[in-house]
Image: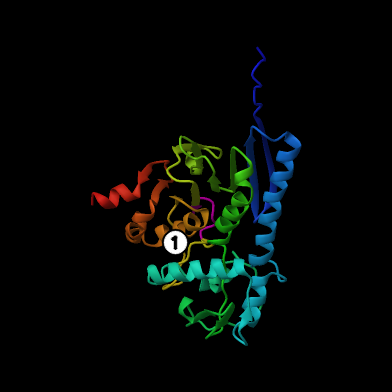
Amino acid sequence: MPATKQSKTNHIKRCKPLLGTYVEVSVLSENNNNNTLIDLSECVFSEIQRIENLMSFHDLDSELSYINREAYNYPCSISKDMEEVLLAALNLSKVTNGIYDISIAPSLVRNGILPDQSIDVDDRANWQDISIANGKISFKRKLLIDLGGIAKGYAVDRALCLVEDQVKNITVNAGGDLRIKEWSGESVGIKASDTKGSNSLIFVPMHQAALATSSNYYMDVNKSAIIDPFTKKELKDKKSISVFASSCMLADALTKVAFLDITLIPIFKPLGVKVISIDESGNVQDLCEALEHG
């Protein structure tokens, strides 16, 4: 009787600097050799690089920089990727009554979080001054947009979806914004405050396919990346907010919403969103559960 052929499981893990952080790709397959897995991981890295080239505020040659320079002067044609991210961002602004606002970029420039591109802006401008129609974007007032709170998650989603059908499992982790194909039963480590040790991780189970985390632990006192769009003031709470969602783009954006106004999170409960907070002492709180029980 012939022996049953055993399938061999191959696994690789690779890392590259992208998106202003380190992107780690872990690929598991029973049908591909390591060389094929390396090629697939390169597809992931290339896709993330492509999205970064489109949506980077730091790159003066990016599509986003072109929009910031010209969209007040005339309607600018935009790529399908840019349109998808911008429409998602504006819809989130509408649902949260402006708590989520991609036009907060000038405050991030003043804080030294983003580079100064010497573009004049109207301090009255907000997300409602952004118009998208027929594949074009225009600004009603002079403003700057930054996609740092949503584009990283979109890049992770795009990259994973590009190759997931060809492998048994894949994880794409962009500095804590991550998505796992086969996520059920997995646990992930979330970095805790320095008071718990610089390399301390708190492990939590995955509740959805994607996870994103925003933290104020390591920001200088006057350089928080979390800005209230109404007061233009920084949020200086020493904590992290982690959001589990079906897509990394949604999780990425909702970490900022939860930081600014946690009472808005129940709006997203039908989407299966889960939100946890870790304070500077390492205490973990399920914010959805806390809101539900008052």
In this orientation, which residue lies closer to the viewer: 155 or 140? 155
Q: Residue furthest left?
A: 294
What residue range appears in magenta?
214-221
Is residue 119 shown to the viewer in this render?
no
x then y, percent, for residue 291: 28, 52
**In magenta stretch: residue 271:** no
- Left or right of 173 in this view: 94: left
x then y, percent, for residue 256: 46, 60
- Left or right of 252 in this view: 21: right
In this orientation, which residue lies closer to the viewer: 175 or 130? 130
Q: Quadrant of the N terminus?
A: top right
- Magenta stretch, main secondary structure, is loop
In this orientation, which residue lies closer to the viewer: 130 or 46? 46
In this orientation, which residue lies closer to the viewer: 85 or 100? 85
Is residue 249 shown to the viewer in this render?
yes
- Dot 1 amino acid type: Leu
For label 1, the residue is 235
x then y, percent, for residue 148: 57, 62
Q: Is residue 247 above or below residue 92?
A: above
